[in-house]
Amino acid sequence: MTHEYSIRQGTQSLPLICGMHQALKNISGLITFSNYDTVFKNNKIIFLKDYLINLLKDNKYVEITGSIENRLPNHLSFILLNKNFLPIKAYKIINFMSDNNISISSGSSCSSSNKNPSKVLTKLRLENNKLFSNIRLSFGEQNSIDQLDKFHTLLLQCIEKF
């Protein structure tokens, strides 16, 4: 009898198991669990996210989506508005950033291959004209303050350009 993709039920993926083992070793000591909450100790990724939030939070053309405090430590998403306070379509910003060697995403990760608006963004009750304008950033240990400063400068150019 076959299961998904012609793989017999119970077949274990040894590479995935080894990868999970290594990932768990890598995060050892970086997170703790308290009262059903996952607590991430201060680290470079949280510092980078907080740094960018501080650059963006007072900009009247940036609408951070979701909670600033209660989000994944490596995640930030927002909607960018142009000078007329209209949302800039995400694909324009993504293409512009890509031309400048910066990788970003749009929507939500659970709907990246879907042409429909993200269910997550819809549940946040975003206006229809903003559902395809959300920018999603993921931070990693390899990112730097210089990269965030460059990203911020390019973001300001997007406000003017689009």
Image (tube, helix red, strand yellow):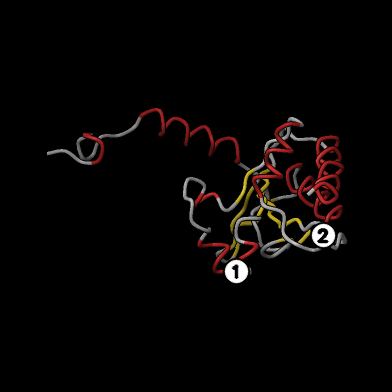
Name the residue tied to disc 2: 61
Q: Position of residue 18 (x, y in %)?
A: 44, 30
Q: Position of residue 148 (x, y in %)?
A: 81, 41
Local packing at callout 1 (Cα closer than 10 Å; few below 14, some 14-19, many 20+) is few
Residue at (66%, 49%) from the top-left corner?
Answer: 90
Disc 1/disc 2 C-alpha distance (Å): 19 Å
Q: Nearer the viewer, residue 70 or 66?
A: 66
- Give the structural element (helix, strand or loop) at label 1: loop
Q: Quadrant of residue 152?
A: top right
Q: Is residue 96 left or right of residue 22?
A: right
Q: Is residue 7 left or right of residue 95?
A: left
Local packing at callout 2 (Cα closer than 10 Å; few below 14, some 14-19, many 20+) is some
- Give the structural element (helix, strand or loop) at label 2: loop
Q: Quadrant of residue 10?
A: top left
What amino acid is labelled 2 in the image?
Tyr
Against 103, residue 125 (above or below) is below
Q: Position of residue 147 (x, y in %)?
A: 81, 35
Q: Is residue 21 left or right of residue 140?
A: left
Q: Of all residues shown, which one is farthest toward the bottom?
A: 125
Residues tagged 1 and 2 counted as in contact (Cβ below 8 A): no
Residue at (58%, 66%) from the top-left corner?
Answer: 35
Residue at (63%, 69%) from the top-left corner?
Answer: 127
What amino acid is labelled 1 in the image?
Leu
Against 98, residue 67 (above or below) is below
Q: Of all residues shown, which one is farthest toward the left?
A: 1
Q: Nearer the viewer, mark 1 or mark 2?
A: 2
Q: Position of residue 22 (x, y in %)?
A: 52, 32
Against 22, residue 44 (above or below) is below
The quarter of the rendered structure image containing the N terminus is top left
Name the residue tied to disc 1: 124
Residue at (25%, 36%) from the top-left corner?
Answer: 5
